[in-house]
Image (cartoon, rainbow, N blue to C red):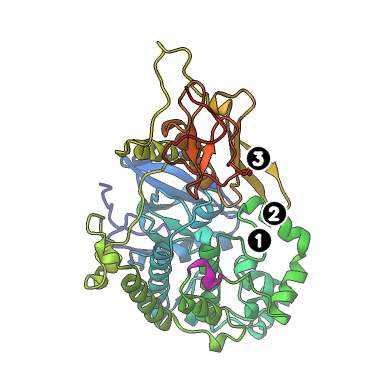
Amino acid sequence: MVVIIHPNTCYRGCCTSDAIPLHLPSSSYSLLSPIAKGSESTVFDATLDGRRVAAKKPVLSTSDDLDKFHRELQLLCSLDHRGLARLVAAHARPPNYLFFFEFYESRNLSEKLHVEEWTPSIQQSLVISLELANALKYLHKLGIVHRDVKPANILLDRNLHPHLADFGLAMYKKDLKHISVENWKSAGKPTGGFHKKNMVGTLIYMAPEILRKDIHTEKSDVHSFAISINELLTGVVPYTDLRAEAQAHTVLEMSYTEQQLTAAITSQGLRPVLVQPEAGVPPALVSLVQKCWAPNPSERPSFDTIVEELDAIMKDVVKTENMETYDALPSFNSLDHYKNGIKDIPRFEENLNWMSQGEQLAKNISNMENSNLRLWSTSQSEPLHYQPTLSCGSFATCGRRETMEDTHFLLPQMCNEKDIHAFGIFDGHRGSAAAEFSAHALPGFLQELGYTSRLHGSCSTSAKGQALCCKCWRLPNNSMPFWSPSSPEQGPCCKLP
């Protein structure tokens, strides 16, 4: 536990806190490896009094940078909401100015979507959307506009709860109201500097009025929220059709210049490809996204309304999915008010190995009591019995859209025949998990379920119940069937002893 040293103020004396230490002995913290680096700061994996934290070290090259540090520290000391990244300490004295935040194990939502290629369930997407909306509602009630809402600034903890971070651009509404080109001119400054200083954020998440060089309002945050939630639901980087972020930005640069994209958003009403109900997303959620990115800021709902609508959508999904059956799962503290309709939201906390999951499914099926299913022999004392060798692997090819993560398997000499082989390729276009699972589950079925085990051949039935000869792999009419393992029976074209 870091001890607060009094007077607990920054070097200037403008920042103070009763709960957050603002100056630390150098022996109490240690900066380890960098986690992320930008033009304005570097974030380090760090320890503070033996506790793992994230340390943000801002670049302070000018007096304006130092003023910005103190403004951000003042703001962070005033915040207390579980949906916001929590400041645990700061060192606000020269020569090292540092912020220390709670460490969030799952990093940020952008990395989760575009590096890990995570595909959240509708329930997980709704939980993240609702908790993020509540955090922004809290900020707006305090009169704070975030001005840079985007997945890269949404940190996820081990249970995938979101925590909005990076308040370097955040400002109070009362301060924004005093900003105008006229005031800037009256101070004898060129208007180009005004736009450079105040048209802040990340282009693909910025509201059209900001791109038209207006001042940020709460409704600008609503637009950025909509772009971010649509990205969460589709898994696609805005204004592209790609999941991989590095490739997406390359395609974005090739498709639009900054000026062209700005013009398309402001004049032509361009928006990212909207998530569709066909993807399993509630139509009410699709409609809410559209309302939140409306061209006219006055037509966008407030976060009070957004939270109400998401709350209703969540309750409807809970009712439809009968989610009260998930008794054994840990609860979401942020959803305590759903106790009458839902007990828990399901989530997976461990990293699954989909290859081993595929193998396990095949083994589980093979253990079912079914006298018609026979395993291939694994006895080394019976050298004449067929023992297949499975080969699996992955390969990547660069397609027009993105890297294709295909997984293949090869099962040679099926049915004791040297010229009969099983080969499959599973498309991993939207992530490798399904392909890895399938490439190990299907061969597992073929191996574990004893599709052919007799020395001279045997027969199975097709999916339609027709006799299927494993020697020639054909139906009596010489056609190639769509088959599935079934009870062995003698086929018309193989003669068993």
Pick whichever of labels 2 and 3 is earlier in the sequence. Answer: 3
Amino acid carrying label 2: it is: Arg
Pick whichever of labels 1 and 2 is earlier in the sequence. Answer: 1
* The image quarter in which residue 61 lies: bottom right
At label 3, counting other C-alpha atoms closer than 10 Å, the crowd grade (few under 14, some 14-19, many 20 or more) is few
Left or right of 103 on screen, residue 407: right
Amino acid carrying label 3: it is: Ala
Residue at image position (32%, 38%) is 370
Residue at image position (40%, 10%) is 381
Amino acid carrying label 1: it is: Asp
Q: Tell me if residue 206 comes above or below residue 248 in the rendering.
A: below
Q: Is 277 colored magenta in this rendering?
A: yes
Q: Which residue is mark 1?
A: 241
* The image quarter in which residue 367 lies: top left
Q: Is residue 339 visible?
A: yes
Q: Is residue 33 visible?
A: no
Residue at image position (46%, 18%) is 385
Asked whether the beta carbons under mark 1 and mark 2 sit within 8 Å of each other, the answer is yes
Pick whichever of labels 1 and 3 is earlier in the sequence. Answer: 1
SS at mark 1 in the image: loop
Residue at image position (48%, 64%) is 167
Q: Nearer the viewer, residue 477 or 49?
A: 477
| Magenta segment | 275-280
SS at mark 2 in the image: loop
Q: Which residue is mark 3?
A: 396
Q: Position of residue 488 (x, y in %)?
A: 43, 36
Q: Position of residue 320 (x, y in %)?
A: 35, 72
Q: Nearer the viewer, residue 486 or 142?
A: 486
Q: Which residue is mark 2?
A: 401
Q: Tell me if residue 452 comes above or below residue 144 in the rendering.
A: above
